[in-house]
Structure formats: C-alpha cells, structure tokens
Image (cartoon, helix red, strand yellow):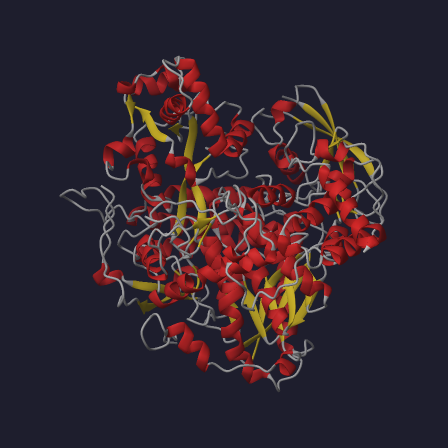
C-alpha cells in the first residue's frame, strides 16, 4: 500500500517543531509500524535527508521504549499493543497517518518523536522499592506465604512497562495509572507493608512536583494502556494515600 | 600472557566458601573513597550497580536506553532456575551444576558453574524480599515449572514475563541507591572506549546520546555488563540496540575474547516474512511441551501449501513428517534447543519449508487440543462428547497455558493458531561466548570485569532454558560484589582518578576522530545496508551448520564488507546532536570486526559441540549416525583470543578444561 505520513519534526528541545509530510510506497500489510518507519528512514538517508528520530528497542512490546502518538492515539489504533506490535494491516492504501510524540509538560520533546520520560524515573526513585539490601541475608522465599490471589493481582499491576501511554492519552496528562500500578504492586504484598505509608506519600508528591495533572476518571489511560493496567490501581493508590494521611 | 583462571584449590563444594573467607576486604569507611563504573543495566549490570552501592562504593551506571528498566533482560519470558528443591523431586546444588555442565556440552568451567548453582537458591529469596511477584500455588507458596534438558521442576516464573519482573526488582534496588546518591545514573549514554592507566582499567569515554557530547568518567574499576552480540546476524531476538561495542572495546585494549562461535539458535521463533524484517520474535520453549513439529512428507504438498492451494489442516496424518519424533523417539519434540534447530534447518534445506521464504516448519497443537478436550470431557462427566465439544474444551486448556503466546503470534502473523498450525523457524537468541574472565570475573585487563551474557563463563557451548536470568543475577548480586573487593582493597590509598591526563586525552581523541570520520564520510550506502550484508554472510556460512570452506569464505567476505563500509558508509546529521544513525554506525563497525573473529573461532574448532556444529564432525555410524560429534581429546579447552590489529591475526590462548567432578559423556537424545 501507499501512504502519506504526516510526522512531527523538531530538531532539538529548544527548536520549534512542525508537521512534515512524507510519502512511502509498497508498504506490506505484514510490516510492523516501526518497520514501516525503517523504510521511511532508509529512504531519507538515501536521499541525503535526516531520518526521523524515534525511540524503540526490544520490538516485542515489553521494553516500553517506543512511544508514538498515531492518529490521535498512543501506540495507534490497535488495542493491547505497543507501537512496535502495531501492524500495517490496521491501515489501508491511500491513508494519511499522523504521527506525533507523546505530549505532556512532564515529557518534553528531545527530538522529533523522542521525548524525555525521566520524570517517571524520579517518581520511582521517590519510593518505588522495598528497602532490603541485596547483599544481605534474607529469609527463605517460602517463609512468607502470599495468597495466590494477592500474588496474581500484584503481578497484574507490576506488568506496567512504563511507556507513558497513560500520560499521553490523558487530557490532564495525569500519571496516576503509572504511579497507581507501582504503589499497588507493593501494597498488595506483605513485603511492601512496612514502608507503605511513606511510599505512597513520597511517590505522589514527586508526581505532583513533576507537573503531571490530576485524575478526573475519564478512563482513557486504561483503554490505551498496552498492558491493560486497570483503573482499580488508581483507586487503590487513592485509598493508600488516604490511609497514609490519616495515620 | 598465560591464562590463569584463578580457580581456588580444594573440593568443589568448598571452593566458594573458602575463597570468601580468605579474600581481602575493604572497610566501609574506605569504600566511600572508591568509584566503580558499571556499563549496562540489565540483570547483571543492574544488580551489580545496586549491590556495590549498598556496600558503600560510589557507582556510576551507564545505559543507552532512557531508563535502566528497558535493558533487554526485560524480554526474557520463561523463568529462572534455582536449586531450591521446593517440589521435593530430588533437586540439589549438585544436580543443577550437573545439568548445566552437561547442557553446555562439557565446555564450561566446572568451578564457576558450581558456584552459580550454589548461589541460585539465594537469588529467589532475595527477589521475593524485593517484592518480585513470582507465581504461587493456592497454598501461597512459590510455584515451579520444568524446562528442557532436565528431570526436575526448578524453574520459578512470573507469568511469561519473568525477565521483566526480575529486572524491575533490580531496577527498584537501583532506584533506592540513586535516591541516596550512591548511584549516579547516566541514561542515554554509550560507552565508546575504556581508559587504561598503568595497565589498569581506570575509566571510560562515553557519548551523551542526547547532546552528542563526549564525556570522560574515571573509576578504580570498570564493570562491563553489556549483554550478548547476537545482532551480528542482523536478525535476532535481541533488541535493536543490543550491541558488542563495550565488550569489543575492552577486547581491543587487552581483554581476551572467548569462544565467540558459541551461539544459541533458538528453535521456536516466528519466521521472517520479508526483506523489511527488523527483528525476530521468540515464542517460549514451553510450547514444545504440547506442540508437535512437522513438515509435509511429499514435495507436491509443500508446493501446494506455498501456492495457497492447500492448507496444512488438509493433510492427513500419513502425509505429515513429524521429523523430531521420527529421528529422536526418546525425546521427540523436547530435544534440546540446538538439536531442534538443526533438524528444522535440515528439512528446510531439503526443500520442505512451508512458507514463501522456504524457512518455516509447523508447530501443531491439534493433538494437544484433542487430548486435553477428551480429558476435560471425562472430568466434567460429558458422555459421548461431539468433536466440536472436545475441541472447545481442549482449546480452553491450551488458552490457559499459552494464551498470551497465541495472542502474540496472532497479532504478528494474522493467523489463528488454535485453528491452523503455527509456523516457526530458528533464530539467533543468545551468545554463550564472550569476554574471557577468571574465577573473579575479571578480564585480562586488571580492574576490568565482565559479567552476565557479556562474559563467557557459565554456559559452555549451549545454554539451558531459564539459566540466563540465573547467571545475570548471580554475577551481579552475589559474586562480583565479593570478588571486586579483593582487587579494590589495594586501591584504598589511590584517591580519585584524575581525568585530565594523557591517557584520557588519547582515548577521547580516538573516539572523536572516529565519530568525525563517520559524519564527514559522505558515502553512498546506509549503515543498515552493510549490517544486512554482514548478517546474511553470518547466517549462511556461520549459522546453524558450519564447514571449513564456508568459514574461510565468510572470513574473506566479512573483511571485504568491512573495507567497503569504511569507504562508503553514509551517516547523515552531525556529531553534536541526537543521531541514531551515528550510534548504529559505531556498533556495526564493531560487529564487522567481531564477525570475522567469530568465523575464525568456528574454523579453528574442528569439532561439533553444543550450538557449534561442524559438518565435518559427525558420527559416521551406529545409533548416533549423523549427530554432532564432540572431540574431547583435542578441543576440551576455552579458546581465548588476543587482539592483534586485524581480526584474522588474533592469537589463540587455550584454557584447558578439567572435569574432576563430572564424567564427560556424549549427549544422546535418541
């Protein structure tokens, strides 16, 4: 198929960006979206132009690096996939595809479609861990029985890949699904109880400091999340925060 | 320089404990004055950085991704082995040790493998304490599954995302130390050279991938944890950015590179669909528990299927060749990875491949669906169930076991694997070879360490499933933090290493000159053009089966591609900005050198062992006719290569392997 790509080009974080149109031809429906971008970039290199910078790495939907906003949706039109798992069969011949970076105050553009997500790093550093020394001696793993239900629910929360689609999809640029998932993973496990109150307070404070917005229960984040992280995690984070503020 | 593995004396089960009791320690007050650089933040690098920082060292960690959490360890699916014997099925440290040495086709160092097995149990304790949500049974205790090549159930897992959860555990430990200021994290940075001062590794030159700035970083020791080099094949299951650069740079500065030809080609990957393909996707080995592998018996059917005139489901049982079951009746579809891969290649080379490229075989779940369906019908007391009912019940069980994998397959291939067999083909997955290290995990450069997949030490010529995660975490959490102290104990009075010295000047200049060359070369071909050509030579001549003629050709061809690359490569953009093409150019330049050494190593090793199959070295008669033939008399050694300029001129050093605790045997799966 032949396509028109309308892509956000921006030289660096200080430059003013703009949408630029490109044509690509003979795109196979079996290509992944990023392979289609490879075709475009090879074309640009061969014609002496600068290729489009975009983040990507594992190309199997788990590293969370790829981050495009395609036709108004984070990771494009399919559900439960990252951009690298999106296939061109979701589009048809003659389509114009609009490709933008994830947009949020806390995710400044570095170049073209690449954004800076280190705000997520700082939220994790504020409390997204259990304070146990790795070099120390711990008790036997089976000394702490954990109900299968709690373990499975913690796993569902922990499956978040930190891509930022929730933020990009939210009209308030809220990071609550991301933070809620991390808070939930530990809140559901006995190992996380000791530091639970400080953890949620510190992570939420850092989230606010980074300039992420609040949650108004629209639920777009849950729809666009490639890993199906549930809104329940936001509710759980709010409960944990309430509990922590009252204790 | 003679190779000294520094394996401690004494019985194998006491070596590590005795060793720890006698090494030099650095007191906590002095650790504050010592800096350590860790390159790479996967399971090995991430766990090492966190642990070293907890101990009190000042750590600088580097990752080319925008977060340590994105290192490719994250993509590991199946699980992590540990000799916990929670299932009471007779597992022990010795058994894990034995399985790993045997699985590696007797080409790994016994003492290192024993230590790995010994610390494995503690890894699980550690990860649980960190909040890693491993799968549990209804009693709340940890669940296990079993993997290929072993007779016990010792694999711990977190759904199909074990690597992700373990990496997030190490990442959380890192975050705690970053917050305390004990780890300084450099995201989007790439190490481009190591700096040696008085023969010791004392720092690195790194490029800030956002600004293009070239930076100097000094330390008392440098730890390279940069993963494997499977992308030398262009197509592999590695991440797009996975590269050999850090390992290759230390090789060029004096670290020997061991067994580069030991590569694992994983049998169950989704086949290539066209020339645009950028990577290959692995489907977990666990699928072979229930899937049967076959190709059509008759060439007419192959052609009809390729032309779309027939569907695989149209073929009767008699018209199918279940070639693994035919060749290996004892192990059937569950033969080890290297054997399964070669058998698929054999059928496809003979012309029986079932897709347009001729490189695919079927992995069929119909029998399993029927078997599970009938079982369920009995359990649910359904008498005389219809065929449809059986299929429906069976599909539910298969979905519960492999649902996420089936969904992944369907998204990529656009076919429903419940209704029609999957197509699979082998792909490059893991590299057992790597930088040579001694028992301390130190390379032949003093003060330069190498851990995880980047080193060579634990998997011999073939790695068993669920062992990569185990090794990465063992090295980072439990081995390196001890062994590095023994070396750093001599550095407590050294003081900060200055970066305004001639050694740093020279290293930085070399890095800058190379970058300037790339952006000013104005050639006519893209970096990918050369990478794809290299990959094709590697796959065709240094792939699943190798012979003398092909390897000699490969060496000459790779040299030729390398020369063309340096003349004609085109890198758009400038040096002082984010420039992904420039990053790729540097990585491919190193792959073009490694590729030739890889072929040279394969040429030297005139035996078949593990993932390395030489067509000249096969059993000629008897029950094992046509199978790989190892040659213990001449080749029971580690091949460690010393850099001498051109890859073809590399000098071979042998570390003889001694097997005192395990008897050498031929692997048989008939």
Tell me where residue A159 sits by quadrant: top right
**On screen, residue B349 above or below B181:** above
Q: Is residue B664 left or right of residue A24?
A: left
Total numbered labels: 0
Q: Is residue A182 visible?
A: yes
Instruction: Where is residue A183? Give x, y as percent.
Output: 71, 49
**Lateral position of residue B375 relative to residue B488, left or right:** left
- Find residue B297 and report its horizontal and vertical position in percent: 28, 23
Q: Is residue B496 left or right of B666 when viewed as pictured?
A: right
Against A234, residue B107 (above or below) is below
Residue B34 in picture, x, y percent from top left: 63, 78
Residue B165 vertical placement versus B26 (above, below): above
Residue sticking out furthest to the bottom: B493
> Residue drawn at (28%, 39%), measured in percent from left and top?
B331
Towards the viewer: B346 or B591: B346
Quarter containing the C terminus of chain B: top left
Q: Residue at x 71, y 42 (%)?
A: A50
């Amino acid at each position: 198929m032949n396509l028109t790509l309308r892509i956000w080009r921006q030289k660096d974080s200080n430059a003013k960006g703009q949408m630029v149109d490109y044509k690509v031809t003979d795109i196979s429906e079996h290509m992944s979206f990023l392979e289609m971008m490879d075709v475009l970039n090879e074309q640009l290199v061969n014609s002496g132009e600068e290729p489009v910078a975009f983040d990507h790495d594992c190309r199997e939907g788990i590293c969370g690096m790829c981050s495009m906003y395609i036709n108004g949706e984070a990771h494009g039109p399919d559900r439960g996939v990252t951009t690298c798992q999106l296939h061109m069969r979701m589009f048809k011949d003659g389509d114009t595809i609009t490709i933008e970076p994830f947009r949020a105050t806390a995710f400044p553009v570095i170049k073209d479609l690449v954004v800076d997500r280190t705000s997520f790093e700082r939220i994790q550093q504020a409390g997204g861990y259990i304070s146990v020394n790795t070099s120390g001696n711990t008790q036997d793993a089976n000394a702490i029985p954990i109900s299968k239900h709690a373990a499975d629910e913690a796993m569902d929360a922990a499956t978040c890949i930190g891509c930022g689609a929730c933020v990009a999809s939210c009209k308030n640029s809220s990071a609550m699904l991301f933070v809620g998932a991390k808070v939930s993973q530990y809140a559901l496990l006995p190992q996380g109880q000791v530091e639970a109150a400080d953890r949620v307070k510190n992570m939420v404070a850092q989230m606010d400091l980074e300039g992420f917005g609040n949650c108004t229960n629209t639920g777009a984040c849950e729809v666009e999340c490639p890993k199906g992280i549930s809104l329940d995690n936001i509710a759980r984070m709010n409960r944990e925060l309430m509990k922590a503020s009252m204790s | 320089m003679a190779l000294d593995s520094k394996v401690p004396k004494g019985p194998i089960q006491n070596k590590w404990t005795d060793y720890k009791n006698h090494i030099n320690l650095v007191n906590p007050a002095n650790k504050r004055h010592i800096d350590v650089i860790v390159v790479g933040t996967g399971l090995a690098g991430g766990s090492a950085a966190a642990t070293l920082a907890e101990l009190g060292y000042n750590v600088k960690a580097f990752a080319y991704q925008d977060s340590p959490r994105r290192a490719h360890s994250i993509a590991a699916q199946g699980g992590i082995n540990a000799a916990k014997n929670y299932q009471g099925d007779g597992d022990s440290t010795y058994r894990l040790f034995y399985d790993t040495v045997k699985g590696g086709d007797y080409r790994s160092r016994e003492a290192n493998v024993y230590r790995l097995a010994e610390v494995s149990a503690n890894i699980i304790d550690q990860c649980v304490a960190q909040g890693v949500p491993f799968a549990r049974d209804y009693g709340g205790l940890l669940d296990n599954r079993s993997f290929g090549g072993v007779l016990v159930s010792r694999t711990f897992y977190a759904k199909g995302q074990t690597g992700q959860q373990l990496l997030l555990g190490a990442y959380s430990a890192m975050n705690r130390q970053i917050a305390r200021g004990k780890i300084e994290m450099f995201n989007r940075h790439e190490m481009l050279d190591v700096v040696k001062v008085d023969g010791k590794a004392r720092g690195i030159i790194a490029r800030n991938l956002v600004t293009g700035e070239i930076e100097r970083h000094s330390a008392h020791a440098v730890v390279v944890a940069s993963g494997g080099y499977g992308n030398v094949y262009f197509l592999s299951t590695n991440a797009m950015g996975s590269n050999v650069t850090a390992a290759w740079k230390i090789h060029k500065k004096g670290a020997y590179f061991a067994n580069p030809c030991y590569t694992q080609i994983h049998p169950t990957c989704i086949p290539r669909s066209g020339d645009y393909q950028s990577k290959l996707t692995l489907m977990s080995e666990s699928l072979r528990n229930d899937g049967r592998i076959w190709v059509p018996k008759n060439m007419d059917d192959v052609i009809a299927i390729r032309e779309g005139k027939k569907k695989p489901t149209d073929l009767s049982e008699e018209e199918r060749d279940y070639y693994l079951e035919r060749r290996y009746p004892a192990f059937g579809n569950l033969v080890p990875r290297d054997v399964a891969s070669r058998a698929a290649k054999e059928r496809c080379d003979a012309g029986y491949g079932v897709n347009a490229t001729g490189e695919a075989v079927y992995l069929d779940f119909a029998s399993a669906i029927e078997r599970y369906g009938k079982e369920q019908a009995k359990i649910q007391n359904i008498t005389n169930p219809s065929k449809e009912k059986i299929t429906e019940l069976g599909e539910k069980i298969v979905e519960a076991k492999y649902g996420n994998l089936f969904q992944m397959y369907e998204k990529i291939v656009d076919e429903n694997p419940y209704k029609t067999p999957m197509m699979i083909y082998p792909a490059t997955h893991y590299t057992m070879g790597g930088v040579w290290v001694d028992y301390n995990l130190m390379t032949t450069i003093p003060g330069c360490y190498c851990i995880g997949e980047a080193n060579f030490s634990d998997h011999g010529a073939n790695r068993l499933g669920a062992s990569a995660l185990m090794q990465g975490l063992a090295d980072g959490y439990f081995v390196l933090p001890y062994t590095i102290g023994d070396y750093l104990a001599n550095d407590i009075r050294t003081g900060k290493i200055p970066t305004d010295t001639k050694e740093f000047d020279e290293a930085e200049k070399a890095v800058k000159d190379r970058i300037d060359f790339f952006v000013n070369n104005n050639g006519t071909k893209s970096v990918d053009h050369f990478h794809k050509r290299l990959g094709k030579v590697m796959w065709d001549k240094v792939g699943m089966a190798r012979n003398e003629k092909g390897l000699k050709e490969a060496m000459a061809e790779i040299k030729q591609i390398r020369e063309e690359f340096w003349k004609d490569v085109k890198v758009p953009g400038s040096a002082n900005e984010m420039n992904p093409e420039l990053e790729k150019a540097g990585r491919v330049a190193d792959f073009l050198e490694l590729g030739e050494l890889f072929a040279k190593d394969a040429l030297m090793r005139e035996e078949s062992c593990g993932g390395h199959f030489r067509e000249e070295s096969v059993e000629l008669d008897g029950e094992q006719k046509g199978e790989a033939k190892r040659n213990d008399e001449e080749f029971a050694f580690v091949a460690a290569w010393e850099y001498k300029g051109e890859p073809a001129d590399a000098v071979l050093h042998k570390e003889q392997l001694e097997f005192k605790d395990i008897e050498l045997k031929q692997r048989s799966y008939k």
